[in-house]
Image: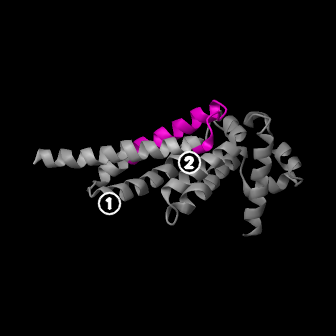
Amino acid sequence: MTSSIITKKMIAKSLKELMETESFHRVSVSDIMSNCQMRRQTFYYHFVDKFELLGWIYKEETKENITDFIEYEKWENIFNQLFGYFYENQQFYRNAFKVVEQNSFNEYLFEHTKNLYIKIIDELSVGAGVSVSEEKKSLLASFYSHGFGGTIRDWIHNDCVVDPSVMSSLMKMIIQDQLLLSLRQSANHKVEKR
């Protein structure tokens, strides 16, 4: 890991720590850098402003928790990891969800979970022996990605009262039952049209 990435991670960790108790809008660049014991100018070597830093956190952490695992990890395990991650970082995300001006977390989460859902659809359709058009696959992946993002937001706003393992199990059950059913019905619908 380069020293630039290490520094960015330290600055990001500082913002996340501060957002455990303060809203994003109350935290200044000086607060962030004082908390991680670095010079204020160092911040500007890496980020234009705190909004860019927040976007970098979203991008890096969704990548680290989703994209980096898509190719070699079972999708079921990715959901376990995601709910565990959001549970551990719930206060940060509770405050982060309130930032709507720019660098919306929903955009980053949607982008990465859509890719995850495409992988899931590919696996389920092969397992069920059905063919899914790219258009239908993209539509289903978008639909479920938006649903996942809303579920995460609601869960965090409700203080994560449902255990992360239960949330992950429920999400996997929905995928196994509803998404697989949708894929099968889509295949049957094509047969009936002929």
| Three-letter code for the amino acid on which mark 2 is drawn | Tyr
Q: Which mark is residue 126?
A: 1
Q: Position of residue 150 (x, y in %)?
A: 52, 36
| Three-letter code for the amino acid on which mark 1 is drawn | Val
Can residue 155 be found in the magenta stretch? yes
Q: Is residue 16 left or right of residue 141?
A: right
Vertical placement of 77 versus 162: above or below? below
Q: Which quadrant of the structure image shows residue 88?
A: top right
Of marks 1 and 2, which one's residue comes earlier in the chain? Answer: 2
Q: Where is residue 167 in the image (x, y as percent from the top left)?
A: 56, 41
Q: Where is residue 156 in the image (x, y as percent from the top left)?
A: 63, 35
Residue numbers of the magenta segment = 141-165
User: For the residue carrying disc 1, how many other residues have a C-alpha within 10 Å: few (<14), some (14-19), or many (20+)?
Assistant: few
Between residue 16 and residue 125, name the one nearer to us: 125
Question: Main SS of the magenta segment?
Answer: helix
User: For the residue carrying disc 2, how many other residues have a C-alpha within 10 Å: few (<14), some (14-19), or many (20+)?
Assistant: many
Q: Mark 2 points at which residue?
A: 108
